[in-house]
Image (cartoon, helix red, strand yellow):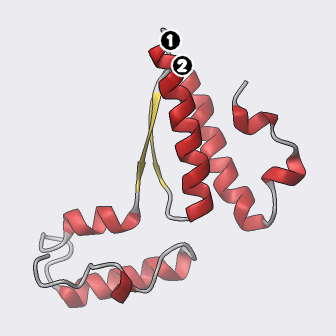
């Protein structure tokens, strides 16, 4: 049984937003315990802490010889950083437009000027 599922529901769900992150991590944990390698995109700080704790638990199980999959966390800013200057995000205007569209759907994203995504090096 995952550490997530053992938490009392009132602790896991502080708000509807928290429930979303909890469900993402719980789904990933179930898949990983079943042997799958799972990638989660999570930008919320509390959700990332929860995902990191579950990833660490799976790493310990694997080190003890239990056959489990893994959880890899990636962040929206990291994905955009890799895409910067490429076909889909060729310039700062494209980056700004895509980021602002994403930000309307994800309250975990910082304002773009605090991400480094508009740096000339990208």
Percent x, y for residue 76? 39, 65
Label for residue 61? Answer: 2
Q: Is residue 73 left or right of residue 82?
A: right
> Residue under circle 1?
64
Residue at the (87%, 43%) spot, across then down:
8
Q: Residue at x 81, y 62 (%)?
A: 14
Q: Secondary structure at mark 1?
A: loop
Asked whether the viewer can see residue 36, the reply is no
CA–CA distance in space, label 2 to label 1: 5 Å
Where does residue 38 sit, x and y in percent of width and height? 46, 37
Element type at mark 2: helix
User: Is 15 displayed left or right of 34 in the figure?
Assistant: right
Label 1 near label 2: C-beta < 8 Å?
Answer: yes
Which residue appears at 47% of the width and 27% of the height?
A: 59
Whole-percent x, y for residue 86 in the image: 12, 70
Count of numbered circles in the view: 2
Q: Is residue 84 above or below residue 104?
A: above
Near mark 2 (Cα within 10 A), the count class, few <14, some 14-19 or many ≥20, is some
Which part of the image, by quadrant, shows the C terminus? bottom left
């Amino acid at each position: 049984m995952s550490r997530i599922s053992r938490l009392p529901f009132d602790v896991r769900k502080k708000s509807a937003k928290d429930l979303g992150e909890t469900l993402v991590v719980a789904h990933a944990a179930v898949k990983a315990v079943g042997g799958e390698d799972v990638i989660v995109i999570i930008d919320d700080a509390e959700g990332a802490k929860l995902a990191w704790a579950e990833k660490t638990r799976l790493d310990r199980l694997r080190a003890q010889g239990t056959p489990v999959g893994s959880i890899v966390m990636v962040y929206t800013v990291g994905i955009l950083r890799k895409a910067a200057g490429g076909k889909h995000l060729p310039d700062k205007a494209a980056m700004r437009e895509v980021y602002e569209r994403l930000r309307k759907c994800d309250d975990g994203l910082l304002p773009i000027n605090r991400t480094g995504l508009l740096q000339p090096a990208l």
